[in-house]
């Protein structure tokens, strides 16, 4: 058992730490932030590959403190500091791996991934720094250096090893450690991958690029200043300049509700529903100019995944946002709105007691109440808060006039604030109030389907091409635009991130005045999408994850029988139902399925350990060779190559290339020869050179045909 405060290993059965005296928790108890919490629904396995954000935090001047202060005092301060760091990490659902002397190492994204782990890690770093500054008791404040890095790691298993190590291996971990050493006292440095994975949610300042010790490529460094203000990070404000693409009819629905409110005083509620990245926030934001032209006040509020456990978070945020618009304190504005005329002392005490209970852990100045007045009875508190909400909104609408309230990411609303949203929806039928919300499809309130739902789907192929052109700032050729549409299913976030990644790695190149796919392009998946889709996969139970992983080896389409054969057991129907409910696969016919789109397939495949992939490809190739119909030579060759079986794969690849060439499929032939060249490079350089030459000839032939067609 390791001490949760100082990290020292304790004696077996000990109740207190031998080093710092901290009481040791019961080994069988569940603790926040400990992987044991997840083991009931996330059993240990062979491990996987995943994207995480690593955090290294190191106390400053530890050696000097030992020289200048009594060791017992230093130990007490360091113990308190380490506890503060651990609390910040666990509060944001990171996993603290270990204390290393006066430093702490943690990861965000293991054992459970979130689609905002880079943001969570950054907020934890900010909380660590702020918490340490608050620790000093008349003595010098403690400072810290923090490094953050995001990237792929391999996890050996889904539970800690006996020595407490998570068993994670990957460059992101060493990168975070190296970056931490470059930070100045009190500074938080992060790499470019973390900044990109945060998708604009962080306020940063460039620190240039460096080559870190032990690495060969340069790493971009940024100093973390804080969480970006709403206007700075919202997707529509940071997107490339240009029109809203492909959402004209949906925008017209929102604008009709706004115009009706402005001309007749009739309010409305509209909820925009769609998957992550589909453009809900972008669409909602596009309605703001019209709202302001019509004289409607515009209030944007949002929910965050890491705020769901904070009671009444949204209710407080709403009150603070309204107060910020008025340029006053939220508590003072609440007093004004609740007591427009003379304040009734009894009501003031009752309302104040309810508000104090709601805002117990947050500032809400202007309500000075005695502790005995804070409402503790749940029934009385709920009834009084409802009364406060009704009076607050009614008064606001009378005094501030018609308005729009946007509630973004409704799916992350904290449970305590559900009544607040229900009240806003109710009041939109009584006042010139338009409530616009954005939500993912799961867990929607019952009132959403009562004529208030607007579903968003992927862009059509021409619209995908238009968006890709805006992102690339150059027109894409037809083949490139079609490939990106097929790969992303028209999801705007996926389109943007894929185009940017393709431009960075050379998959897209200039050709004849346009941007086109390179002849030897590789479908690299952006790390931002790995994290986003990896979180969706990680939310599944073990059976569903295993089925998805096996299916990804088979291909975009798969059937029950083949998955069961590769798994070595039958798959219950409920597993496929879970995958469909999570919008990861789509049924095509009885017993057959396909991935919702290629990026989900790629994310599932990328999560498999390389050894697991090779084993599955080998078994699949054996199965295909044993079939009398249905399997092509090319399919078998690809799986043999993916299994690492060069001896059997090389002749199959070359034969498949010749067959494809005979049919005029020169691009496919070139791909087979390139794959053969890669396999033969180490064992037979001359044969590899010949394969590359044949691939080049095929590529040139394809280019001639393509140019002739143009």
Image: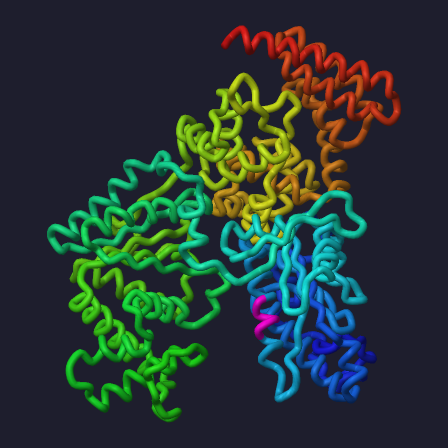
| Residue 368, above or below 416 | below
Q: Image point 17% across, 58% down: which residue?
A: 432
Task: Residue 13: give x, y in percent of width and height.
Answer: 79, 81
Pick out the residue farthest to the right: 683
In screen coordinates, is 146 left or right of 409? right
Q: Main secondary structure of the magenta part?
A: helix
- Looking at the picture, tell me which residue is in the foreground, 681 or 644: 681
Residue 540 in view here: no
In screen coordinates, is 438 left or right of 88? left
Q: Image point 30% across, 40% down: which residue?
A: 250
Task: Residue 256: give x, y in percent of width and height.
Answer: 20, 44
- Looking at the picture, tell me which residue is in the foreground, 185 or 122: 185
Task: Residue 580: give x, y in percent of width and height.
Answer: 49, 43
* Residue 592, quarter of picture: top right
* Residue 602, quarter of picture: top right
Q: Image point 78% across, 85% down: which residue?
A: 68
| Residue 556, above or below 433 | above
Q: Image point 72% across, 28% down: which residue?
A: 639
Task: Residue 40: give x, y in percent of width and height.
Answer: 63, 63
In screen coordinates, is 678 left or right of 315? right
In screen coordinates, is 601 left or right of 157? left
Which segment did they paint magenta?
126-130
């Amino acid at each position: 058992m390791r001490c949760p405060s100082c990290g020292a290993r304790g004696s077996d059965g000990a109740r207190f730490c031998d080093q710092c005296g901290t009481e040791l928790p019961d080994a069988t108890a569940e603790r926040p932030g400990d992987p044991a919490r997840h083991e009931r629904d996330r059993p240990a396995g062979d491990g996987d590959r995943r994207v995480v954000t690593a955090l290294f935090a190191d106390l400053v001047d530890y050696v000097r403190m030992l020289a200048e202060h009594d060791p017992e005092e230093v130990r007490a301060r360091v113990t308190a500091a380490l506890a503060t760091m651990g609390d910040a990490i666990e509060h944001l659902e990171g996993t603290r791996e270990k204390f290393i002397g006066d430093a702490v190492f943690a990861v965000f994204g293991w054992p459970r991934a979130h689609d905002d782990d880079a943001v969570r890690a950054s907020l934890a770093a900010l909380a660590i720094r702020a918490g340490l500054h608050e620790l000093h008791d008349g003595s010098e404040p403690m400072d810290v250096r923090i490094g953050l890095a995001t990237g792929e790691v391999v996890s050996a298993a889904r539970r800690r090893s006996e020595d407490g190590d998570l068993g994670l291996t990957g460059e992101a971990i060493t990168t975070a450690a190296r970056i931490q050493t470059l930070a100045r006292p009190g500074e938080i440095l992060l790499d470019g991958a973390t900044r990109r994975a945060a998708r604009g949610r962080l306020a940063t300042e460039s620190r240039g690029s460096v080559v870190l010790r032990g690495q060969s490529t340069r790493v971009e460094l940024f100093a973390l200043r804080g969480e970006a203000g709403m206007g700075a990070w919202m997707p529509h404000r940071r997107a490339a300049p240009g029109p809203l693409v492909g959402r004209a009819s949906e925008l017209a629905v929102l604008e009709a509700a706004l115009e009706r409110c402005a001309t007749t005083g009739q309010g409305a509620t509209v909820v925009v529903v769609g998957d992550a990245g589909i453009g809900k926030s972008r669409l909602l934001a596009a309605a703001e100019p019209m709202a302001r032209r019509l004289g409607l006040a515009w209030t944007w509020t949002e929910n965050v995944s890491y705020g769901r456990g904070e009671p009444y978070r949204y209710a407080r945020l709403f009150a603070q946002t309204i107060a910020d618009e008025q340029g006053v304190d939220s508590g003072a504005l609440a007093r004004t709105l609740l007591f427009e005329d003379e304040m009734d002392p009894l009501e003031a005490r009752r309302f104040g007691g309810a508000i104090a209970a709601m805002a117990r852990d947050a500032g809400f100045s202007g309500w000075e109440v005695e502790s005995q007045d804070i409402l503790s009875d749940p029934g009385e508190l709920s009834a009084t808060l409802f009364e406060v909400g009704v009076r607050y909104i009614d008064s606001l609408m009378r005094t501030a006039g018609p308005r729009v309230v946007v509630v973004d990411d409704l799916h992350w609303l904290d449970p305590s604030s559900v009544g607040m949203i229900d009240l806003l929806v109710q009041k939109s039928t009584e006042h010139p109030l338009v409530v616009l919300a954005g939500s993912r499809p799961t867990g929607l309130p019952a009132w959403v389907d009562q004529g208030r739902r607007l579903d968003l789907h992927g862009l059509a192929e021409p619209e995908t091409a238009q968006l890709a052109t805006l992102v690339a700032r150059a027109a894409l050729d037809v083949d490139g635009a079609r490939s990106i549409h097929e790969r992303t299913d028209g999801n705007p976030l996926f389109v943007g991130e894929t185009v940017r990644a393709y431009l960075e790695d050379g998959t897209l190149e200039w050709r004849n005045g346009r941007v086109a796919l390179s002849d030897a392009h590789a479908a690299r998946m952006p790390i931002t999408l790995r994290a986003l889709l990896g979180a969706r996969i990680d939310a599944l139970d073990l059976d569903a994850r295993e089925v998805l992983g096996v299916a990804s080896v088979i291909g975009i389409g798969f059937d029950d029988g083949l998955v069961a054969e590769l798994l070595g057991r039958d798959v219950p129907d409920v597993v496929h139902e879970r995958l469909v409910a999570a919008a990861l696969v789509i049924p095509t016919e009885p017993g057959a399925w396909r991935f919702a789109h290629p990026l989900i397939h790629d994310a599932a495949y990328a999560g498999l350990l390389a050894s697991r992939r090779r084993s599955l490809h080998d078994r699949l190739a054996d199965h295909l060779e044993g079939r009398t119909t249905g399997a092509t030579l090319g399919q078998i060759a690809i799986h043999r190559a993916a299994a690492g079986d060069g001896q059997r794969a090389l002749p199959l690849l070359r034969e498949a290339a010749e067959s494809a060439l005979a049919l005029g499929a020169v691009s496919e032939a070139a791909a087979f020869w390139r794959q053969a060249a890669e396999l033969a490079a180490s064992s037979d350089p001359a044969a590899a050179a010949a394969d590359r030459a044949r691939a080049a000839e095929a590529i040139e032939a394809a280019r001639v045909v393509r140019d002739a067609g143009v």
